[in-house]
Image (cartoon, grey):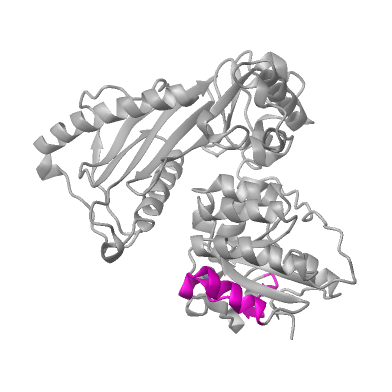
């Protein structure tokens, strides 16, 4: 989708909202709005099966029946469309994804006391679906979040491809084999180099990183009867004004890599491997460390955040600094491009649980679930499985020590950035105490933390400090981390 079709989508959505509002007014007894007091898992949304004639906002729907979730309050407008295929497991996976998007949107709204008087916000989710042969279906969702404080709406896509027989979610490696990443990357690069208006922008670092032959760059794809289409998030390879872009690669250009027979009925795709993400577990890229200069590990918890994380990544890049991001599992799908950038730029990704609970209050199964689900989400998006876990609130008990198969990473300097949310206070917390071997705790969800980093990192650099990941810091200090033990360093 380019900017033009996104614009068309917006215009259609606007017309759709007006029509939807009229129809919903007539259906008010059926419609219930949700309240902020409901927790995210208990929210029950009124679902209207669409036998109502709306202008069809989606260009391509080859499978399923559309269902919708709507809220016609103009201050909190919600319009979500998703397909129901009538296949239990697939429908459950889709519904879970939709609920995640919705909860994420709700959870990130300012609460009543912090909301500006004229605050309004909206969430749109729409989709296209494609069918390949008689065994594979692909869905591409466009998600657009907006509010009156944002200069531009937050737009992203996410795709799902299913084997209709096993009902398994497929990754690219279930469909292609061999050096397929190289083949796709070459095709995409060649395509954009020869296509206006993209050609002049293909010699940028953004383009070369975003189109490099790594799994993380080609997570969004669909299949139809003639081609594999790969999608690139806004900002992934081109400046934001290009929006989301896609390239269709005809199957004849993928001969030798396809595991499926596209001429006739698509062959059975092995379902056993389908749910397991590729486990490359690439080591975090090594930074040359000068043993004569001090080192610190900057750590950022609770992200990714759609605005703050990219800002911090920019600052790290400008200063050739590496850091560690302890991410929350239930945020990574929504902010996949931020997570993928963290990984692509050589930072370490750590596990900070799935929903940030107090792990010491949970039983063994729930503790394991918090750790494993987060690993899975991260591996799905990056092919990397975190080696380190930072427990929320720094709390550790025996259940965690005995069951979590990872070292725990605490900190030696707490910037208290979440409490002060003040650039100068954060800088002062660090500059007054910092020494060789420190692990510094910050949160990449507050703009003030990014502002502090812009000042702090060059200042520490000037004092000779080198910025390394936590794993690099441990290696530098000749510490072999052990699962179930806690590490805080410095002293
Ligand atoms: Zn946290």
* Whether residue 204 is situated above or below residue 325 in the rendered picture: above
* Whether residue 163 is situated above or below residue 195 in the rendered picture: below
Number of numbered markers: 0
For the C terminus, the image quarter is bottom right
Residue 396 placement (x, y as % from top left): 59, 81
Q: Residue furthest bottom?
A: 491
Q: Is residue 425 magenta?
A: yes
The residue under the point 18% across, 49% down is: 32
From the viewer's perspective, is 436 left or right of 210?
right
Residue 160 placement (x, y as % from top left): 52, 36
The residue under the point 62% across, 40% down is: 274
- Residue 351 in view in this figure: no
Residue 79 placement (x, y as % from top left): 30, 38
- Residue 412 in view in this figure: yes
Residue 155 placement (x, y as % from top left): 45, 38
The residue under the point 71% across, 37% down is: 205
Q: Quadrant of residue 411?
A: bottom right
From the viewer's perspective, is 132 left or right of 18?
right
* Whether residue 180 is situated above or below residue 330 in the rendered picture: above
The residue under the point 27% across, 66% down is: 113
Residue placed most toward the observer, 98 or 106 = 106
From the viewer's perspective, is 154 left or right of 417?
left
Range of the magenta residues?
405-432
Residue placed most toward the observer, 371 or 245 = 245
Residue placed most toward the observer, 382 or 4 = 4
Q: Is residue 178 magenta?
A: no
From the viewer's perspective, is 110 left or right of 372?
left
């Amino acid at each position: 989708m380019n900017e033009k079709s996104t614009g068309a989508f917006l215009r259609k959505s606007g017309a759709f909202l007006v029509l939807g509002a009229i129809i919903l007014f007539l259906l008010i007894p059926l419609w219930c709005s949700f309240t902020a007091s409901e927790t995210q898992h208990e929210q029950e949304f009124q679902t209207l099966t669409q036998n109502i004639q709306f202008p069809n906002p989606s260009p391509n729907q080859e499978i399923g029946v559309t269902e919708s979730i709507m809220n016609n309050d103009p201050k909190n407008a919600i319009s979500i469309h998703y397909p129901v295929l009538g296949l239990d497991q697939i429908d459950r996976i889709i519904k879970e994804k939709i609920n995640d998007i919705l909860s994420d949107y709700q959870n990130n709204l300012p609460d009543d006391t912090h909301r500006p008087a004229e605050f309004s916000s909206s969430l749109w989710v729409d989709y296209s679906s494609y069918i390949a042969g008689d065994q594979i279906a692909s869905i591409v969702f466009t998600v657009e979040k907006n509010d009156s404080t944002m200069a531009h709406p937050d737009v992203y896509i996410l795709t799902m491809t299913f084997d209709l027989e096993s009902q398994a979610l497929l990754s690219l490696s279930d469909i292609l084999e061999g050096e397929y990443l190289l083949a796709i990357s070459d095709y995409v690069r060649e395509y954009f180099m020869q296509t206006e208006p993209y050609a002049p922008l293909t010699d940028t670092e953004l383009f070369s990183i975003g189109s490099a032959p790594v799994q993380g760059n080609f997570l969004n794809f669909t299949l139809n009867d003639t081609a594999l289409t790969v999608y690139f998030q806004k900002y992934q390879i081109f400046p934001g004004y290009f929006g989301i872009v896609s390239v269709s690669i005809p199957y004849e250009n993928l001969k030798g890599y396809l595991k499926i027979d596209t001429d006739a009925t698509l062959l059975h795709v092995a379902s056993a491997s389908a749910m397991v993400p590729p486990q490359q577990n690439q080591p975090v890229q090594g930074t040359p460390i000068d043993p004569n200069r001090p080192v610190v590990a900057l750590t950022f918890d609770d992200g990714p955040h759609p605005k703050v994380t990219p800002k911090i990544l920019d600052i790290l890049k400008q200063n050739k600094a590496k850091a560690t991001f302890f991410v929350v599992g239930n945020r990574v799908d929504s902010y996949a491009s931020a997570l993928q950038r963290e990984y692509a730029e050589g930072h370490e990704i750590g596990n900070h649980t799935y929903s940030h609970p107090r792990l010491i209050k949970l039983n063994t199964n729930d503790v394991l679930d918090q750790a494993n689900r987060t690993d899975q989400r991260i591996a799905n998006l990056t092919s990397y499985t975190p080696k380190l876990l930072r427990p929320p609130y720094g709390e550790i008990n025996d259940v965690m020590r005995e069951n979590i198969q990872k070292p725990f990473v605490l900190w030696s300097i707490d910037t208290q950035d979440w409490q002060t949310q003040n650039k100068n206070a954060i800088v002062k917390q660090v500059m007054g105490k910092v020494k060789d071997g420190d692990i510094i705790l910050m949160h990449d969800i507050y703009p003030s933390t990014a502002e502090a980093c812009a000042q702090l990192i060059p200042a520490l650099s000037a004092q000779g400090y080198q910025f390394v990941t936590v794993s690099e810091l441990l290696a530098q200090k000749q510490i072999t981390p052990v699962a179930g033990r806690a590490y805080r360093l410095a002293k």
